[in-house]
Image (cartoon, rainbow, N blue to C red):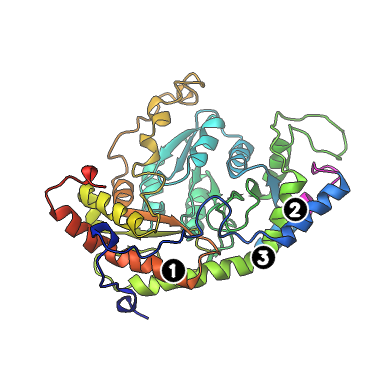
Amino acid sequence: MSGELFRDTGLPALLGGEPVRTAPLPVAYNGSGRLFGPQEEEAVRAVLRRGTLTRWGGTAVDALERAWAERLGVPHALAVSSGTASLHVALAALDLAPGSEVVTTPITDMGTIIAIVQANLVPVFADVAPETGMVTCETVEAAMTARTGAILPVHLFGRCADTAELRALADARGVYLVEDASQAHFSYDREGFAGTHGHISCFSLQQSKVVSCGEGGIVVAEGRFHERTELLQNKGWLRGRQGGRAYPMVGLNYRMPELSAAVALCQLGRATEIIARRRRSYAVVVEALKNEPGTVIATERPGERASWWALCVRWPELADEPELAAAVEKSLQADGVPFAPGYIGTSPLYLSAALQRRGAEGRHGLPWTLHPEPPVYRPGDCPHAERFLRESFVLNWNEGITPDDAADIARALLRALPAARAFTASAVPVGSRP
């Protein structure tokens, strides 16, 4: 296949023609597109029949932890209540001095940053590779200081970050590596699975993730950190261990309930099928756009196999042409393909109101008040990240998207930029048009 097979010569919907697609794509949060069915329903019913909905006395959470660890080839996995909780537990388990710095990416979900701040650690942002939107060893090392305690990379869109190299950097500098593999369940490259290089690694099981139970998370911790993560997610005690409720440390209640684990366990059993479906439809779009001038689609590197959490398409010329970017968004929406600009917006997280105020509301300035020279987050801090967001459009991907759906998406993408150019060529401002 080539892009010409998908190219639509008709008038684009943005210019008054027929839309590529009128039926909604299965990408919404209303449950469309996900493989939830009788298997999950029966698993939930079985938990209800047993009558134990908490993990203590139940079987589903324990089974999920064993199955996740076995699939990744690691000794332990710990189920928690959300992806954000998994990151909070991971960072707290490191027991870093309050006010220590965590070097992370400006292109991620706010949950990554929330976990850093709630652990009384200070987020410091490294720039990203222009091609991937992910941090690199070079950008992370440039952001490190004597106060750096951890590195927290994020595997983006289903691709693998350079975590094996980042682990080597962390070991050389005497700091910890925490992986956020929420978007890359069972993605792998030549160095192994995403989530197997960190001192601690974290996964989200939220609605859109490859393995989902609506809300949930998994923590994979090395050696001595595993027991600390167990303590932290269970209010500071190890149930069933010698000593009873000795409370050796203060923890939180981040336990996963049995109902969530029952669904996640079924989903984990279907992960191979889920990933295969995502990859099959994603490949249709890659084939259609791979030779399109001026268009860049996220693809795998040699030796990499991505589980594809989202489709990211970039038009580099849009970074300097905001009106053209707005018209591209209007073209995609008009054609029934709901791409969103950037990644959770077109600004990096360090420009969010919460970080600009540096904890002024609700936290009395913490954790920044614990730092002798707290960072000030300014526009231009990570120029590659800021440009990446201005030129990108992202669509959540899932196993419900068929190859035919993917062909429609490709058609809409192929005509989006030409339609936007024609649209902006008129003298009427974009905001005043229907």
With 91 as the anchor, is 105 left or right in this view? left
Q: What type is the residue that disc 2 sits on? A: Ala
Which image quadrant is residue 145 in? top left
Report the quarter where the N terminus lies.
bottom left
**Helix, strand or loop for the magenta stretch, by majority:** loop
Q: Could you tell me how far apart the alpha carbons at marks 2 and 3 are, in whole angstroms?
A: 13 Å
Outermost residue on the top side: it is 364
Q: Regarding mark 3 in the picture, which secondary structure is present there?
A: loop
Q: What type is the residue that disc 1 sits on? A: Ala
- Which residue is the site of mark 1? 406
With 399 as the anchor, is 254 left or right in this view? right
In the rendered image, residue 5, in percent from the top left (x then y), is placed at: 33, 79
- Which residue is the site of mark 2? 262
- The mark that comes first in sequence, 2 or 1, is 2
Magenta stretch containing residue 392, yes or no? Answer: no
Say few, some or many: other residues with alpha carbon within 10 Å of mark 2 (under 14 / 14 to 19 / 20 or more). Answer: many
- Which residue is the site of mark 3? 270
Nearest the camera: 321 or 141?
Answer: 321
Q: Regarding mark 1 in the picture, which secondary structure is present there?
A: helix
Nearest the camera: 185 or 434?
Answer: 434
Which image quadrant is residue 56 in? top right
Nearest the camera: 95 or 236?
Answer: 236
Mark 2–mark 1 CB contact (< 8 Å): no
Q: Could you tell me how far apart the alpha carbons at marks 2 and 1 are, in whole angstroms?
A: 31 Å
Residue at 35%, 33% (x, y): give it: 377
In the rendered image, residue 45, in percent from the top left (x then y), is placed at: 80, 52
Label tally: 3
Q: What type is the residue that disc 3 sits on? A: Arg
Q: Regarding mark 2 in the picture, which secondary structure is present there?
A: helix
Q: Which residues are magenta?
A: 52-64
Which image quadrant is residue 80 in? top right
Residue at 32%, 75% (x, y): give it: 3
